[in-house]
Image: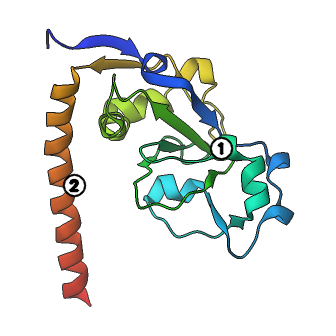
Amino acid sequence: MAEWNNTHLSEVLVDKGYIRGPFGSALKRCDMKDNGIPVYEQQHAIYNSRYFRYYIDEQKFNEMKRFQVNTDDLIISCSGTVGKVSIIRSDDPKGIISQALLLLRVDQKKILPLYLKYFFTSRDGYNAIVSRSSGSVQVNIAKRNVIEQIPLMLPKIETQRKIVEILNSIDTKIEENEEINNNLAA
């Protein structure tokens, strides 16, 4: 543990790497199309699914490029079911986030995106988001300055890589077993 450093989330994000989804007035129902460029919603973070209900056209996408997802971005649910996280994979379609998501873009020289995802899916990481959130009827993610101060214990990149490899191999085995179980049930 001697090689681990105490830091905060703000220290591992790139410049402008904290992006809260657009205000509702920036992305209206009339902007939505039946096809085109997908809009990532809260369900994509909660269920790690990539089934899309809403799309925008190229013109609206260009207006909203600030909210565009890139490979290795983390998307986090922001209201109701707060703190669920998914990572944008290289085979995910280009798109933008909705107002119910937070996008985090990390400095990969400091932290691996999958390492941060695993942190937020751990009990401590999940509790770090949820305990800072507020609301009695509808829970909402805390303000930026609060979320950016979430503490992280950060090992060197090589150690992060080893941790990610182990956890990823476990996830892969779980997915394979779920697929086998689904096939057996069918």
Residue at 40% across, 55% down: 90
In the displayed structure, 143 sits above or below 99; it is: above
Q: Is residue 51 left or right of residue 144?
A: left
Return the x and y of residue 72 as percentages of the image width and height: 41, 44
Q: Nearer the viewer, residue 155 or 145?
A: 155
Question: What residue do we see at 46% from left, 42% from top?
Answer: 74
Q: Nearer the viewer, residue 59 or 95?
A: 59
Query: Which quadrant: the N terminus?
Result: top left
Q: Which of the labelled discs sits on residue 171, or is there none?
A: 2
Which secondary structure, mark 2?
helix
Determine whether the residue tagged by mark 1 lies in a helix, strand or loop: helix
Which amino acid type corresponds to the residue marked 1 in the rendered image?
Answer: Phe
- Asked if 54 appears above or below 100 in the picture, the reply is below
Along the horizontal axis of the image, is 85 left or right of 35?
A: left
Q: Position of residue 60 (x, y in %)?
A: 78, 56
Give amino acid for label 2: Asp
- In the image, is 89 to the left or to the right of 144? left
Q: Nearer the viewer, residue 62 or 55?
A: 62
Q: Residue at x 69, y 66 (%)?
A: 55
Q: Nearer the viewer, residue 100 or 96?
A: 96
Dot 2 or dot 1, earlier in sequence: 1
Foreground: disc 2 or disc 1: 1
| Number of numbered discs on residues | 2
Residues at marks 2 and 1, CA–CA distance in whole angstroms: 29 Å
Residue 21 visible from this viewpoint: no
Location of residue 146 (image quadrant): top right
Q: How far across and down, in percent of the image, does residue 73 sit?
A: 47, 42
Q: Which residue does the image show at 33% across and 27% down from the upper left?
A: 111
Numbered circle sitting on residue 67: 1
User: Quadrant of residue 56 in the image?
Assistant: bottom right
